[in-house]
């Protein structure tokens, strides 16, 4: 029976009255799978198993596939005709494969722009294979691929073996990425260990599992691991000639995380860019400024250049502001009132207490420097400085203290007398 005959026979079977009973059983399988996902989904959800909405995760198609396959086996055991399950089981299997690949790639590479393109490629490939299988053309295509062969290193290799090896390698890598993402998520959720230590453990785990997965994938694809000796020599030459910076950034990333000189959440200044460290990856560090701009700094730069860490040993940071009062103001009596006004701002610390200093005798008035401390610099400086200035302004207005403005005296000179001409000139 050729492919077209098998397809038409399947089409006629789908029109049989028993197909309605199969549809009912299939609907029950889907409903039961959805109910299990709904009842077991944790609050806040997401993740590889449950996805964003529950049914778009990996668990739903896997449960539906298992239930449908069980119903199909039961129908075959009772020698009942099946048509709907002959189509539904491969569709659910294809959906499960797509969901696994997509969710694992999203978890392993959440910010990679190539993930979306890979999703489309995987989806199109799986659905094309499904159509070929349902129509009966897949065995014909496999036979043609088996006929295409050539020799590599004296060993015969067919197109089918290469494709199957590549698919097996991809499946191994997806499984390793899934395991890596699960372990990394558990490590990052642990609360008893410092965040930087968890980050380095997660990065090291991912690197080790990816190396193991790559070796297993090469072995599954039929590539002899003995060839890695030549490959390793080539990689070593490449690192020595052109990849020193890349290797240095990776090593620097592990050094930063290991010695904890820079931690996620620290407020730092690097190359005149100030912000809070939001992520330390194996190659670069992300610094986010208060205005929303982000700077991606290579890790080698964080090791070899001067970095100001405002919260390395102590998160307390001193900020200053200035104000002028008119000459003749009672400055000794005014200072405690300004200190009390600054201390009333929510983010200003009481230990150390704010201070007021007479810093200069300016041209227009007495200049006072306001000094206050905060412990949450990551929440911004301009907003707390504005609140302190407003509190000081209200205090000065309540005390009737004048804030001078520039005054200038303009003196008009009399016009110059006209020169007198000499007599007889």
Image (spheres, rainbow, N blue to C red):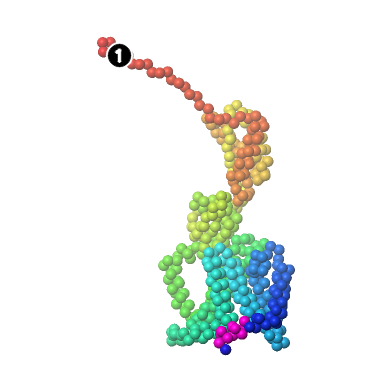
In the picture shown, does residue 355 fall above or below 217? Answer: above
In the picture shown, does residue 72 fall above or below 37? Answer: below
In the picture shown, does residue 312 fall above or below 208? Answer: above
Disc 1 packing (10 Å; few <14; some 14–19; many ≥20): few
Estimate the x, y position of residue 251 in percent, counting from the top left.
51, 64
Task: Locate residue 149 relative to residue 2 in the image: left or right.
Answer: left
In the rendered structure, which segment of residues is drawn in magenta? Answer: 2-11
Q: Residue at x 45, y 21 (%)?
A: 412
Q: Is residue 176 visible?
A: no
Classified by dominant secondary structure, the portion drawn in magenta counts as: helix
Task: Locate residue 97 relative to residue 74 in the image: left or right.
Answer: left
Q: For the view shown, which residue lies furthest in the top direction?
A: 423
Estimate the x, y position of residue 28 in percent, counting from the top left.
72, 75
Q: Residue at x 53, y 81 (%)?
A: 164
| Residue under pointer 1 | 421
Viewer-side residue, 15 vs 155:
15
Local SS, label 1 = loop
Task: Locate residue 413 relative to residue 140 in the image: left or right.
Answer: left
Split into 4 quadrants, where in the image is the N terminus? bottom right
Estimate the x, y position of residue 61 in percent, counting from the top left.
65, 73
Split into 4 quadrants, where in the image is the C terminus? top left
Q: Residue at x 57, y 56 (%)?
A: 277
Estimate the x, y position of residue 166 in percent, counting from the top left.
52, 78
Q: For the view shown, which residue lies furthest in the left direction?
A: 424
Q: Is residue 13 visible?
A: yes
Q: Residue at x 66, y 77 (%)?
A: 65
In the picture shown, does residue 267 fall above or below 140? Answer: above
Residue 362 is a magenta residue: no
- Counting labels gives 1
């Amino acid at each position: 029976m050729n492919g077209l005959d098998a397809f038409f026979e399947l089409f006629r079977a789908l029109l049989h009255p028993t197909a309605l009973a199969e549809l009912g059983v299939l609907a029950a399988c889907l409903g039961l799978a959805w109910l299990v996902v709904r009842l077991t989904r944790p609050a806040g959800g997401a993740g590889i198993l449950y996805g964003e909405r529950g049914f778009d995760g990996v668990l739903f198609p896997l449960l539906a596939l298992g239930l449908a396959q069980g119903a199909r086996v039961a129908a075959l055991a009772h020698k009942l005709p099946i048509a709907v399950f002959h189509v539904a089981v491969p569709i659910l299997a294809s959906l499960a494969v797509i969901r696994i690949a997509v969710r694992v790639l999203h978890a392993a590479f959440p910010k990679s722009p190539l993930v979306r393109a890979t999703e489309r490629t995987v989806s199109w490939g799986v659905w094309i294979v499904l159509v070929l299988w349902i129509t009966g053309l897949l065995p014909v295509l496999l036979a043609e691929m088996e006929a295409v062969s050539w020799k590599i290193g004296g060993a015969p290799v067919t197109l089918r073996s290469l494709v199957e090896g590549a698919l097996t390698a991809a499946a191994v890598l997806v499984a390793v990425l899934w395991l890596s993402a699960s372990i990394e998520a558990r490590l990052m959720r642990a609360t008893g260990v410092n965040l930087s230590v968890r980050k380095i453990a997660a990065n090291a785990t991912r690197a080790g599992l990816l190396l193991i997965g790559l070796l297993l994938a090469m072995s599954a694809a039929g590539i002899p691991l003995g060839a890695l000796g030549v490959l390793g020599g080539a990689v070593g030459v490449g690192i020595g000639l052109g990849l020193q910076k890349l290797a240095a950034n990776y090593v620097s990333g592990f050094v930063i995380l290991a010695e904890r000189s820079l931690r996620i959440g620290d407020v730092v200044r690097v190359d005149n860019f100030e912000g809070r460290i939001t992520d330390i990856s194996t190659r670069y560090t992300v610094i986010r400024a208060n205005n929303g701009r982000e700077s991606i700094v290579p890790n080698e730069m964080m090791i070899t250049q001067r970095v100001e860490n405002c919260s390395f040993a102590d998160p307390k940071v001193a900020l200053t502001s200035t104000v002028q009062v008119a000459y003749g103001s009672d400055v000794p009596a005014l200072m405690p009132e300004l200190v009390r006004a600054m201390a009333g701002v929510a983010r200003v610390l009481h230990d150390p207490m704010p201070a007021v200093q007479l810093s200069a005798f300016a041209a227009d008035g007495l200049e006072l420097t306001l000094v206050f401390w905060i412990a949450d610099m990551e929440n911004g400086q301009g907003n707390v400085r504005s609140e302190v200035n407003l509190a000081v302004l209200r205090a000065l207005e309540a005390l009737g203290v004048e804030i001078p403005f520039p005054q200038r005296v303009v003196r008009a000179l009399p016009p110059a007398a006209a020169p007198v001409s000499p007599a007889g000139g």
